[in-house]
Image (spheres, rainbow, N blue to C red):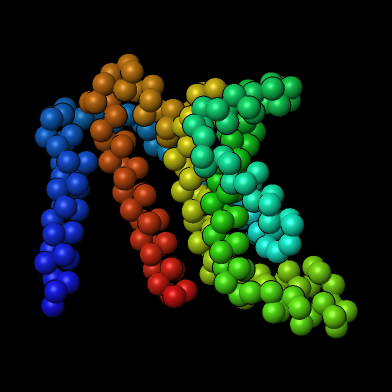
C-alpha cells in the first residue's frame, strides 16, 4: 500500500513529461507541414538501421563471448567507448577511412557509422547474459574436447532472447543516429538529417509532424523491448 503514493507521483511526472514533450509543441505550432521527404528519410533510416543491426548483433555476440573471461575482458573499454563520446567525434574518426573509400555521402558511410555506434549496445546486452550464465558450461565442455566454436554456439542458444534484445537496441541506436552523419553522410537523407535541415530552413512547422512520427516508432520498439525483457525475466 505504501507504494501507491510513489506510483501515483511517478505517473503524474510521466504525464507532465509527455505533455511537455508532445502536447506543448503541437499547441505552439498550429501549422504543421508534413513533407513527403520526411517519409523517405524515415524509410532510409529504417532500412539502413536494419542492415546495421543485423551486422552489429553477431559481431557484438562474438565479441561478448571473446571477452567474457580472462585477460581479454580488458578489451571491453575499447569496444564500449563509442557510447561515451559525442558522435560527431565518431564521424571525425571515421572520416579518413570513409574518404579513403570514396564513400562520403553514401549508404556505406551511413551503415558504417550506425554499426560503430550500435555494436556496443548489442555487445553489452549479450555479454551481460553470458556473464550471468557463468563459466561452468565452458569448464564442463572444453575438457571433453568440444571445440570453442561449439561452446560459443551452446552459449548463444541459451541466450537467444538477449540476442533479440541486443538486436532491437542496436536498431534503435542506429535509427536515432545524427552526430556522425553531420561529418560523413548528409546524403542520402536519414531521419536525423531531415529533422536537422528542416528545422534550420523552416523551423518547428516543418519538423513537429516528423518528430511525432519518430516518437511513435520509438514507443513501439521500446514496448517490444519491455515485452521481451519481461519474458526473459
Does residue 14 appear in the picture of this structure? Answer: yes
**Residue 80 location (% of width, % of height):** 59, 46
- Figure quadrant of the N terminus: bottom left
Query: Exactly how many numbered labels are in the figure?
Result: 0
Q: Residue at x 44, y 28 (%)?
A: 193
Q: Is residue 137 left or right of residue 180?
A: right
- Figure quadrant of the C terminus: bottom left
Q: Residue at x 42, y 34 (%)?
A: 191
Q: Residue at x 42, y 32 (%)?
A: 192
Relative height, residue 219 to residue 109 (above, below): below
Q: Residue furthest right?
A: 145
**Residue 95 location (% of width, % of height):** 64, 23
**Residue 232 location (% of width, % of height):** 47, 74
Comparing 148 with 167, the one in front is: 148
Relative height, residue 37 to residue 125 (above, below): above
Q: Is residue 58 left or right of residue 117?
A: right
Classify residue 144 by image quadrant: bottom right
**Residue 139 location (% of width, % of height):** 76, 78
Does residue 59 appear in the picture of this structure? Answer: no
Amino acid at each position: 500500500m505504501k507504494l501507491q503514493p510513489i506510483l501515483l507521483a511517478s505517473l503524474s511526472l510521466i504525464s507532465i513529461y509527455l505533455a511537455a514533450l508532445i502536447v506543448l509543441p503541437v499547441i505552439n505550432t498550429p501549422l504543421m507541414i508534413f513533407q513527403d521527404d520526411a517519409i523517405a528519410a524515415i524509410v532510409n533510416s529504417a532500412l539502413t538501421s536494419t542492415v546495421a543491426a543485423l551486422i552489429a548483433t553477431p559481431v557484438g555476440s562474438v565479441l561478448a563471448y571473446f571477452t567474457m573471461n580472462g585477460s581479454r575482458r580488458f578489451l571491453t573499454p575499447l569496444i564500449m567507448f563509442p557510447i561515451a563520446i559525442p558522435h560527431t567525434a565518431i564521424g571525425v574518426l571515421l572520416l579518413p577511412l570513409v574518404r579513403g573509400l570514396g564513400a562520403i555521402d553514401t549508404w556505406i558511410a551511413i551503415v558504417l557509422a550506425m554499426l560503430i555506434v550500435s555494436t556496443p549496445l548489442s555487445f553489452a546486452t549479450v555479454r551481460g547474459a553470458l556473464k550471468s550464465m557463468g563459466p561452468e558450461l565452458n569448464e564442463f565442455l572444453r575438457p571433453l574436447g568440444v571445440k570453442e566454436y561449439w561452446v560459443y554456439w551452446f552459449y548463444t542458444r541459451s541466450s537467444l532472447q538477449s540476442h533479440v534484445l541486443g538486436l532491437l537496441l542496436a536498431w534503435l541506436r542506429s535509427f536515432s543516429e545524427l552526430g556522425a552523419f553531420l561529418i560523413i553522410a548528409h546524403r542520402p537523407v536519414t531521419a536525423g538529417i531531415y529533422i536537422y535541415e528542416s528545422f534550420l530552413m523552416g523551423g518547428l512547422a516543418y519538423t513537429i509532424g516528423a518528430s511525432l512520427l519518430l516518437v511513435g516508432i520509438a514507443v513501439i520498439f521500446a514496448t517490444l523491448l519491455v515485452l521481451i525483457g519481461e519474458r526473459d525475466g
